Amino acid sequence: MKKEIVIGENDCGQRLDRFLTKAFPSLKSGIINKAVRNKDIKINGKRTEAAYRLEKGDRLYMFFPDSLIEPKSLDPDDFMKAADMLNILYEDDNIILADKEQGLVVHSDNDGTADTLINRIKKYLFVKGEYDPKKENAFAPALCNRIDRNTCGIVIAAKNAEALRILNDKIKNRELSKKYICIAVGELPKKEDTLTAYLQKDSDANQVRISNTKTPQNLTIKTKYKVLDYCKGLSLVEIDLLTGRTHQIRAHLAHIGHPLLGDGKYGNNRVNVKYGFDKQALCSYKLTFDFTTGGGALDYLNKKSFEVKSIPFRSFWNSLKLSK
């Protein structure tokens, strides 16, 4: 079967082989490389390379059995099952900054739920007419960062492929600053400090272990904190993650004896029950775009900061202060 695809805005800029594996899951890298060698894949009627960077307007020709080039299922029914509620902190033509609620997963987990943050975003954009999976070859709106189910706060979503590529690059190069606010049990010994330790992930238990000793298996973590306030044996703390590892804030603070209030995995259940917290008091509350290199189509975001308007546990803290 001969198939022709015209490369659009959301397809260009990526390698040919990566585009094909996303658009047609049955096409594995070995099949693609062999087809390129045999001239069964061409760009604009000419021989190409698997590493070729697609350009907008390119015509991709493929000669494959039908069974190998069945398109990826992009049935909107799945994301249309998601809830309508979406707290948007900021939106423009390229990105959405969503204020994720506690209890909502960012992507589908093992229970296969359709009500995820990314599905809510897809549904929102679909209803607005800004996203139609049937008109896309391989792209779908995507999250650029993730936070735990029971952590609330800012999650960045890219509405097009160019924005996604830029943001992924900026995050990798630490050109975005994300700050968290939390309530820790006990009074931290210093008002400000940068903690260093070593983290090893246990995927089966969905848990991490922290050590003061480096091994070949664990990864270095650095957590910078600043105590904003103390009250009744609790600390209100701002966190700046200098590394971004799984459960880093929760596990690192627990490791030094100051777990997050409400954390059932790493925390103190007796204290959690005392204060009536069943979810960790942790919020990704502030995001600053701090580009040190050109931001391309997103350069207008440079030096802009966004902050969550309502932190769920802030009212608890204010009440605690008033009851002193």
Image (tube, grey):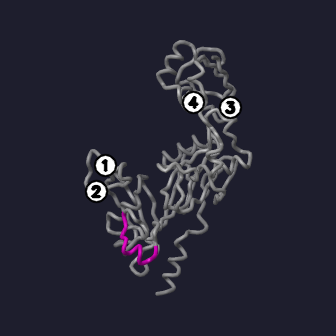
Identify the residue under disc 1. Answer: 218
Identify the residue under disc 2. Answer: 211
Crowd class of label 3 (few under 14; some 14 to 19; many from 20; radius 10 Å): some
Q: Nearer the viewer, mark 2 or mark 4?
A: 4
Residue 111 position within the rendered picture, expressed as x and y whole percent measured from the top left: 49, 50
Residue 265 visible in the shown view: yes
Q: Which residues are magenta?
A: 266-276
- The disc, 3 or 1, on the residue closer to the chain's N-terminal end is 3
Does the residue at mark 4 contact the one at mark 3 (Cβ under 8 Å)? Answer: no
Does the residue at mark 2 contact the one at mark 1 (Cβ under 8 Å)? Answer: yes
Q: Amino acid at mark 3?
A: Gly
Dot 2 lies on which element? strand
Question: Which residue: 66% across, 39% down?
Answer: 133
Q: Tally the numbered discs.
A: 4
Question: Which residue: 60% across, 35% down?
Answer: 73
Crowd class of label 2 (few under 14; some 14 to 19; many from 20; radius 10 Å): some
Dot 4 lies on which element? helix
